[in-house]
Every structure is written in C-alpha cells, then in structure tokens.
Image (cartoon, rainbow, N blue to C red):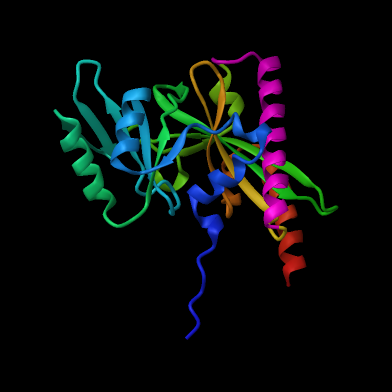
Amino acid sequence: MKVKKADPLQSKWYKTKLLLQSGFIKRYIPDTRRFSRSNLEQMIYSYGMIYVKPERGTYGNGVIRAERGERGGFTYQYEETVRQFDTFEAFHKSLAKKAGRRRYLIQKGIHLLKHNSRRFDIRVMVQVSPKGAWEATGIIGRLGHPRKIVTNYHSGGKPMAIEALLQSHLSPHRLARLTEELNTLGVRMAAHMQKTYPKIHQIGVDVGLDRSLIPWIIEVNMMPDPYIFNQLKDKSMYKKVMRYRRVQLKKKQ
C-alpha cells in the first residue's frame, strides 16, 4: 500500500522557512522557532509574551498564549483555561506535556490592537485572477471572542470590515496606505511561494497589527475560507473572491 506523503505546505514551520528566503517578506515575520526547552526559555525571557502553536493545524486549534509575570512566575492560556506557575521548570513541563508527541512552534507574541477590549487581526485574501496574475481580492478584520486568544471565525471570532475596527486607530488616509501595503505584501508572498509550488492559486495571509501599528505575519493559510467575506454587509469582495475561485476550480476540472 502506497503511503501518501504529507504536504509540506501544511507545516507552519516549512512555510516560515520558505518565506524567510525573501528579504522583502522577512521583515514582517516575527521570531519563530521550534518548541524546545532552550528556545522556550530564551523567548519567554526575551519577549515576555509568546505564542505556542502546533506546527500543523487549522482554525487556531491548539494555540497557547504564554506570558512571564513582571514579578516572576509564568502563565499560559489555552482556549478559556488559564494556568499559573511559580517556576520555569513547572511551566515548561506543563507545556511539554500538552504538546505530547506533536511538533509545536514558538512565536514572538504580538500585542494585537483591540476593538472594544477584544483583540483583532486582519485576513488578506490573495488569488490568481482569471487573467493569470496574482491579485489581492479581499481584506477583512477578525474580532476575537472576548474569552479566547485566537480570532478565527470557527473559534467564535467575528468577521468585520477593517474600517470599523481601525477607525479609532488610523485616519482614513493612513488606513488606505496600510491596506495598500498589506495587499502588496500578500501578492509578493503568493508570488514568492509560487516559485517553489507553481500549482498554488490562493493564499490567506493573517496579519496582526501591534500597538505601534506595525504589521506582522501571523500565519499563511493555503485553504482560506472564502465565506467569511459573506459576513460583510458590502458583498462586493465576497462576489469577487467567489468569482475568482470558480474560475480556478473550473481550470482544475
């Protein structure tokens, strides 16, 4: 019986290494390393807050947010459960047990902007157009569930227009410039990845804005959900995303 090889693009670690090969994209990627005791210790002490996430997985499942207290001690949140530890040893032991045999990554924590005290990030949809060129076809905000650390729709996140989420943080002119920057980043990422994987025709780029309004790539999704754009009142992005999607599906037939 022939064993089917795992798709390397399902690995967050592989995608990170691939994107780091681009000097333009590299500056948007937060420090990301494989989970180990030494990496955990270095990163929690360097950054104060980190995310520990499965190397393979979707919908934000298994993501852990960990912090070092100002007066010592460590905490982490998994889904809606928060655990506290007095020592690094106990903290590491608990995380290692939770990871089990699965491969995990550690990523520098980004203190995301908030809207009504809830964290949010941004999804940029990039697709091959009917003419064969990469194009950013949709951009949407994802407002996290108040008791959860991830913003995914499947974890209780709320899709929203980025204008509503960013109006208290950015002027309309600055928002237009940011949107252009994120769209350009998405297209550059897709084109870079296509050099190695010529058959890809879409990506979803999850971007977090920190308190200084600097964008950071949180994750790249190879099978982005197009239906979140249908949650917006303005259906123009949704219609475009679906039109481009139908063209690509037809070409595959």
Horizontally, residue 112 falls left or right of residue 133, namely: left
Q: Residue furthest bottom?
A: 1
Q: Residue furthest front?
A: 38
Residue 165 included in the magenta stretch of the image: no
Q: Position of residue 141 (x, y in %)?
A: 55, 33
Q: Position of residue 232 (x, y in %)?
A: 60, 39
Residue at 82 percent of width and 54 percent of height: 130
Residue stretch in magenta: 168-197
Residue 180 included in the magenta stretch of the image: yes
Horizontally, residue 69 falls left or right of residue 128, namely: left
Q: Say above or below: 183 vs 223.
A: above
Whether residue 79 is visible to the viewer of this picture, yes or no, is no
Q: Position of residue 62 (x, y in %)?
A: 34, 48
Residue at 50 percent of width and 82 percent of height: 2
Q: Position of residue 87 (x, y in %)?
A: 15, 30
Residue at 76 percent of width and 43 percent of height: 135
Which picture quadrant has residue 92?
top left
Q: Say above or below: 101 vs 120.
A: below
